[in-house]
Image (tube, rainbow, N blue to C red):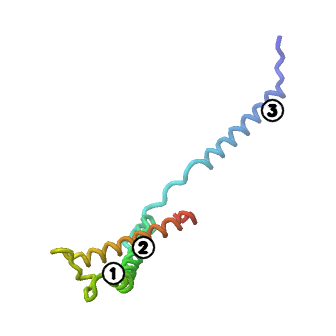
Amino acid sequence: MLKWDFKYQATMAATDDEMLAELREIKKLLTPAPPPPPPHGLVNEFRAFLAKYGVLGLAVAFILGVYLGNLVKALVTDLILPILSYALPSGTNINTYMVGPFGIGDFVNNVLTFIIVALVIFLIVKLATQVKVK
């Protein structure tokens, strides 16, 4: 015949209640908060749009890219191409240089500009990944 220990059962019941309370607390902490209500009004919606999609950062990067391209184009046109013109016959301008019936001066100018811009962007991305900028 088994004897029931009421004291043990009461202690177990209290322990079970404590465990359930802890589990409910854990569940409450793990449940994600409801999303914030959508902004009202045109200005607030625009601010939320800018914050969510990083449009301002994209705009700044675009503007800097345009001016970087202009800077590199000036570097190629004003410094590199005059140095290359010394390799050409005297009296010819590299921008009007012709190979047969084809004018290749502007093309060479644009190819050099593209290569330098691509190299600068590659170096910026490589530096950013080393610093771990997102």
Dot 2, crowdedness within 10 Å: few (<14), some or many (≥20)? few
Q: Is residue 109 above or below residue 36?
A: below
User: What's the residue type where badge 2 is placed?
Assistant: Ala
Q: Mark 2 falls on what kind of element? A: helix
Q: Is residue 80 above or below residue 24?
A: below
Residue 9 image-quadrant placement = top right
Disc 1 to disc 3, C-alpha distance: 97 Å
Q: Mark 3 falls on what kind of element? A: helix
Disc 1 to disc 3: CB gap under 8 Å:
no
Disc 1 to disc 2, C-alpha distance: 37 Å
Q: On the image, numbered disc 1 is attached to which residue?
A: 87
Q: Position of residue 55 (x, y in %)?
A: 41, 69
Disc 2 to disc 3: CB gap under 8 Å:
no
Q: On the image, numbered disc 2 is attached to which residue?
A: 61
Q: Position of residue 129 (x, y in %)?
A: 53, 63
Q: On the image, numbered disc 3 is attached to which residue?
A: 11
Q: Position of residue 127 (x, y in %)?
A: 53, 68
Nearest to N terminus: mark 2 or mark 3: 3
Q: Is residue 111 above or below residue 82?
A: above
- Residue at the far left in the pictured view: 101
- Residue at the far bottom in the pictured view: 91
Residue 42 image-quadrant placement = bottom left
Marks 1, 3: nearer the viewer: 1
Q: Is residue 100 above or below residue 36?
A: below
Q: Which residue is more in the foreground, 103 or 39?
A: 103
In the picture provided, is 26 more to the left or to the right than 89? Answer: right
Q: Position of residue 93 (x, y in %)?
A: 26, 85
Q: Residue at x 82, y 20 (%)?
A: 4
